Amino acid sequence: MTDLHVLRLTSVFEPDTKDADEVEAQARFDPIGGTQNHTANLTRAMDARGVRQTVLTSRLGGPVTDTVLGHRARIRRVGLPIRRFRQLWALAAAATALRAPAVDLVHAHQGEDLATLPLAVFAARRHRCPLVVTLHCSVHRTVPTAGLKLSLLRWLGGPLETACLRAADAVIALTPASARAQGGLQARTSVIPSGVESEHYPALPSPLLADVPHPVVLYLGRLARQKSVPTLVEAFGLLRQPASLAVIGDGPDAHAVDEAVHRLPSDARVRVHRSGFRPHDEVPALLAAADVLVLPSVYEEMGSVLVEALQAGVPVVASRVGGVPAVVDDGVTGLLVPPSDPAALAAALDRLLADPDERAAMRAASLARAAGYDWHSLAERVAEVYDAALTARRSRSDNRAASPGTV
């Protein structure tokens, strides 16, 4: 695949900086989560395979840049640093996408951004090449109709998403449940989850949590409504077991999380440590310092931090939503609870906090399952999807050329 040129379209990508203050400022503009890490890790893994890539993404709160990642990948960040008009990045990207030279395949990454897929369809048609779509979050099936914003996103974005997926040559779903939901598109849908750069594990415990008493329950990720972190804080007020809660992340729900902490009862047997966003390369060390990871989301396509917890051998308590059960084996690598249920979440945490033997068994089970999520092997599976889409496209072109009456 060394001669292949992939045009990768994604509304979010990992920050183009190593400066911790600048990264945190960008995280406050747009919380950094699984899609950013997925697209960057896949780009690196495909670059290692010799694939040439042009990545078009939003600048979000950072500058317009054109940089090199690895050996042959160019990352171009465009758009306006305005939250309400962030989807205008696609208009800024359109000229580059349509004029990019010798594109062999377009790969779009669909999250909660409605602009990515139409841009990808137009680019694939312009270059007369296959279109592959990875569904990081289906606005048609995963996003709940809860509140005006999410309801509008689903009602307006659902039909658009469906139409664009029908135009795709191949679809990549992160979990089997997401693949089954594709209905008539299942025949061209492959299941390839998010992965982990396994060479970074195991790690030494993060000094950031060195003074936090064990057992440590860790939340690691975006502070956004979807993640329902205030529910986790409320659950801590119901715990019977002593524990420390470490909340690592930033985002629009940060104030709500802080308010939930202040509402904890004075006699709560917990200690809360909250830190802002930390760069993704610190995740292995943060997980190494934790006894339990919690993901209390109200909706989730997969939850890439759960895969990282497997790699670190950290037991998980997570909401039974979306594709989470495909990653967390209930009672084996973690415990699943109903979303938005502080009492159930507290009961699951109490169970694990009171039983170090069960945590040790879950650690062993997690490490045994981690190998299936290594990015190097997952990139090979993505390359197979590329090959199949390219082969099918060539076959259709050959058949049209050989048909009687072809001009």
Image (tube, helix red, strand yellow):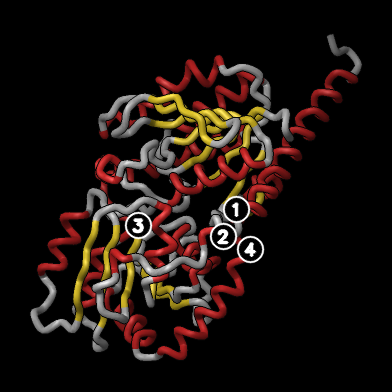
Q: Position of residue 347 (x, y in %)?
A: 32, 84
- Location of residue 5 in the rendering, given as x and y in whole percent from the top left corner: 65, 28
- Residue under label 2, please give it: 198
* Side of 142 where 29 appears, left or right: left
Any part of residue 224 in sight: no
Query: Toward which corner of the image does residue 18 lie, by quadrant?
Result: top left
Q: Earlier along the polypeptide chain: callout 3 or callout 2? A: 2
Q: Is residue 295 left or right of residue 374?
A: left
Q: Is residue 344 left or right of residue 329?
A: left
Instruction: Classify mark 4: residues with Cα within 10 Å, few (<14), some (14-19) or many (20+).
Output: some
Q: Amino acid at mark 3?
A: Gly
Q: Which element carries disc 2, helix, strand or loop?
A: helix
Residue kind at label 1, given as amino acid type: Trp
Q: Alpha-carbon distance for marks 3 and 1?
A: 20 Å
Give the alpha-carbon distance from disc 3 to disc 2, as whole Å.
19 Å
Residue 71 location, x and y as percent?
59, 33
Residue to which mark 1 is pinned: 375
Which quadrant is home to the N terminus? top right
Mark 2 is on which residue type? Ser
Q: Which tag, 4 or 2, sits closer to the chain's start? A: 2
Q: Earlier in the sequence, mark 3 or mark 1?
A: 3
Image: 47 above or below 285: above
- Label 4, label 2: how many angstroms apart (C-alpha)? 10 Å
Nearer to me, 100 or 404 = 100
SS of the residue under disc 1 = helix
The residue sitting at 55% across, 80% down in the picture is: 364
Residue at label 3?
221
How far apart, in angstroms, are the residues tagged by discs 4 and 3?
Answer: 22 Å
